[in-house]
Image: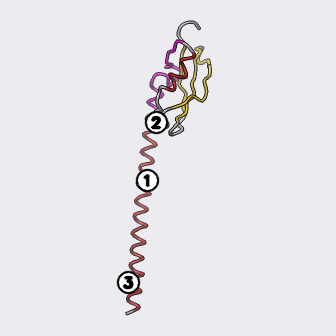
Amino acid sequence: MGRLLLFALVGGALVSLVWHLAAAARRRAQGRREAQAAAEEAWRREAEARAAPGGDPSRPLEVSSPAVVEPRAEGLPCPVCGGEVRVDEHLARLVDGQRLRVARVSCRRCAHTREIFFRLTGQG
Ligand SMILES: [Zn+2]
């Protein structure tokens, strides 16, 4: 009788253990799928941001003055999460003979960094 109880307890514990392991494996697999989907989504949004004005040296945003570069850059939300960005660096760069301004921004929320390109209009 005592033995039967022991078997029942051990058997029950084993069933419970196997069930928990299977559930954990399912959660891990789902987590991987979600992480992969999130990475693909982030990649797609980054590609979209690069194709948008300012995302590439060949498509700079036009500004009238260097003073406008930083506020304009900070006005563009993070392409990955939509969070606010801050300007880490503001550089002048010559790309294919064009004098461009580059704002290096990083997201305050997800830390994604990117460069936004500007061209000064008016006097050079
Ligand atoms: Zn972000």
**Would residue 61 be counted in the magenta stretch?**
yes
Disc 1: which residue: 31
Quick one: SS at disc 2? loop
- Residue 81, how many percent across, how many down? 45, 37
Task: Identify the mark nearer the N-term, 3 or 1.
Answer: 3
- Name the foreground residue: 3 vs 40: 3
- Residue 89, how many percent across, how many down? 61, 27
For residue 80, the mark is 2
Q: Dot 2: few (<14), some (14–19), or many (≥20) neighbours within 10 Å?
A: many
Task: Identify the mark nearer the N-term, 1 or 2.
Answer: 1
Left or right position of 91 against 20:
right
Q: How many marks?
A: 3
Choose top left, top right, bottom left or bottom right for residue 41.
Answer: top left
In the rendered image of this protein, does residue 44 appear above or below residue 73?
A: below
Pointer 2 residue Cβ closer than 8 Å to ligand 1: yes
The residue sitting at 55% across, 13% down in the picture is: 65
- Residue 64, how many percent across, how many down? 52, 12
The residue sitting at 45% across, 24% down in the picture is: 52
Choose top left, top right, bottom left or bottom right for residue 82.
Answer: top left
Could you tell me if the residues under marks 2 and 3 are in contact, i.e. CB atoms within 8 Å? no
Left or right position of 93 against 110:
right
Indicate the quadrant containing the N terminus: top left, top right, bottom left or bottom right: bottom left
Could you tell me if the residues under marks 1 and 2 are in contact, i.e. CB atoms within 8 Å? no
- Find the distance from the CA under tag 3 to the CA under tag 1: 34 Å
Indicate the quadrant containing the C terminus: top left, top right, bottom left or bottom right: top right
Disc 3: which residue: 8
- Find the distance from the CA under tag 1 to the CA under tag 2: 19 Å
| Amino acid bearing label 1 | Gly
In the image, farthest residue toward the top: 123
Magenta segment: 46-64
